[in-house]
Amino acid sequence: MNVTAWKRLFIALVCAPLLAPGDVSAADAVLDPRLLPGGQADLPALQRELERLSAGRATPAVVPAPPGTGVRLPGLERLESSAFLAATDPFALEPLDGATRVLLLGPAGALEEAAEALAAQAGARGIALAPLAVTPAGSPSDTALHGADAALLLALPDLDGDAQRRLFARLTEAGVPSVALTDARQVERGALLSSPRALDHEAWLRRVALRLDDVAAGRAPEPLDSRPGLERPWLNLETADRLGWSPSFALLSQARLVGEAAAPGRARLELAQAVALALADNLGLAAARQGVAVEAFERDLAASRYRPSLYLEATGRMIDETRASAALGQEPERLASGGAVLEQLLFSEPALAAIAVAGSLDRARRAELEVESLDLALDVAREFLDLLRLDASREVLQADLELARAQRDQAVRGEAAGAVGRGEVARFEAELAQARERLERVAADRERLRIALNRRLGRDPSAPLVPAEPDLTRPGWLGADSRFTAVLDTSASLAAWQERLVTAALHDSAELEAIGELRQAARRELTSRRRAFWLPEVGLEARYTSELSRSGEGERAPWESSNPLVQTGVGVLEGVGVSLPETGRDQWSVGVSARLPLYAGGRRSIQRDQAAARLEQVAVEDAEARLGLEARLRAASVELAAAWRRIALRDEARDHAEEALRLAEVAWQEGALPQVALIDARTSARQAGLAAAEGRWQALQALVHLQRALGISPGPMDERARERLLAGAAGARQGGGER
């Protein structure tokens, strides 16, 4: 082989790698999918974010990399850092209340660091944390799940959606509630609850895309030193129902609900579920919560006055050259100086009052938010029960329509046979038309109420709504509860029960708590306005100033001249102890000041009187709220007792009216009863049926109003809520008998 052939072979070997096609180009962004909560399933969304950021430039293609390889972004060695996992205490969540053994499920590579990050919190609560690796090859065995009280879930990027659903279904079947620490979307796949600060998936993809875009553009990416978190937890109602676990009212009102909300028309809707849906996605409540979050910054602003204030200042000055010459170098014609100033407030009564008032107002706003939530829950409960009442009325009116049609047909046949006249047929025709009109009116009312209730629940107005009828025989609705039966025995037992309810309501009312905080704020403001007449404001100031440049006349003092004769004279003077000042020195000062205004146009007196009037106003509002709360509570308790007694009476009246109607029909067919009597009997039966249908809903309406007055979420009550409602009712019967 000659020299030319060797050269050609060498060039071919060098150029072959460059000309060979490759799967990954230099412009691609090679990323480890395990750094995304959804793994490779999140790559398309990340690609869309990159396309949005490119803004006309060539968009790098996101290519999955093998584990541990790919582009390196500062602060992104792993998805779940120790700081992110320890930012919240997952062991304080409701599903883990009383747990002693908790599983930690996640990829094998992330388990060790995650267990170390959560070990301190678990140990503080006496909880044994058991890490358990989850792989695509298989789920944990039944033996591993045995004895676990709950499970904490890390992100599972190696498992697709179906594999995660199977895993969470196995946990639910084993009775193990699962809490997603990182990926809240796991709740949509069957996990029970997510951490309140789970990873904000969309915000995280935007941050990663921004760093990848920086890398593609040749810029140094900023470190990913923090993880964006969601504002509220997610809760799966279907999983909670399968586990037999009942979340608290506070959790229902704060969480984003999935499960039932995803398919609301699939089954009958319970009252508790309707209330939870309304509280979770109501825009008015969301705005109120955001308002509380915004106003909470007022506390930080008030407290910031007691933090030091440090700032830089620069000064440029020019004076008359004659004055500069006469200053002997102490004030040059042109001077530029810079300095640093530190200010610290030592004592200020208005600042202290502002901190206390801001704290009281924040607590008042949070109590008012709870009041608004309870009011919304009451409105939803009332409309829900009205919907059930209309359903029951529609059934009664439907039966009445069928009966009117049958009687009309019977009269028509009698007219054809010559047994009755045309007048009786016309009367039955009129009754049939009126029965149809009553049914259509109730159906229209029901449709209008369904649309309004769907709107409160955040659903499509045209979506079907099938409310589930409460079972009044259950203890959750006070049925079969001997304590409630004892309350209804005598008027004395009812009065004693009302006194206990009033005492409990006045003690625990959120409305009174909000007014109490407002009164505390008004009282503190009045105290501050009074003290402002004799308490000064004390502050500290430290200042350091340095000359940056000086020029023009008076730049130097005469004794600073470079003339040898002048310097000889200066040396003689300094030798005998005469010190001549130098120009251009740095200066510093520290000072404490106290300021007490003597007269401000009468403004302080006006502010004091205004604060006193505001305190009196809040006191009057508190008295009015107490009277109103007591009146509502007593009225609701009386109506509940009366409506509960009316249920049996109205059922009995309905049975007798139906029996009278049957006898009247037989007598009319035999010609022994006039038509008017038959119509009267049917009217009585219809009215008795409507009254019986409405009796139970009137009792439930009174019950939800009573629950609202006591600060209890409207709906079926557990043992603790019933204990709060009927506390001491067992002794009311004995006390009433003694009276």
Image (cartoon, rainbow, N blue to C red):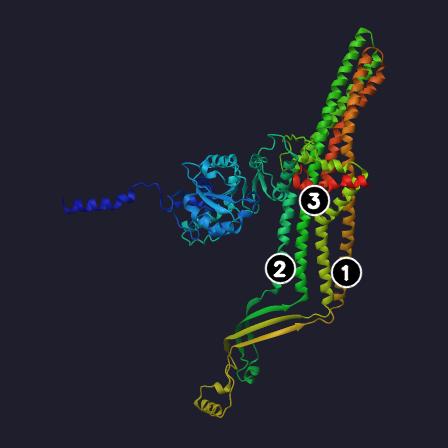
Q: Quadrant of residue 262?
A: top right
Whether 489 is drawn above or below 81: the answer is: above
Q: Which residue is mark 2?
A: 301
The tag earlier along the polypeptide, 3 or 2, is 2
At horizontal 78% and vertical 40% (from top left) the residue drawn is 493
Whether 174 is drawn above or below 6: the answer is: above
The tag earlier along the polypeptide, 3 or 1, is 1
176 left or right, relative to 346: left
Q: Which residue is mark 1?
A: 612
How would you rate the neighbour count of disc 3 (Cα within 10 Å): few for under 14, some for 14-19, many for 20 or more?
Answer: some
At horizontal 70% and vertical 51% (from top left) the residue drawn is 514
Whether 430 is drawn above or below 316: the answer is: above
Residue type at mark 1?
Ala
Q: Which residue is mark 3?
A: 711
657 left or right, relative to 723: right
How would you rate the neighbour count of disc 1 (Cα within 10 Å): few for under 14, some for 14-19, many for 20 or more?
Answer: some
Residue 324, percent from left and from top:
55, 82
Residue 525, percent from left and from top:
71, 61
The tag earlier along the polypeptide, 1 or 2, is 2
How would you rate the neighbour count of disc 2 (Cα within 10 Å): few for under 14, some for 14-19, many for 20 or more?
Answer: few
Asked whether residue 376 is in view, the answer is: no
In front here: 607 or 396? 396
Between label 3 and label 2, give the one nearer the viewer: 3
Local secondary structure at mark 3: loop
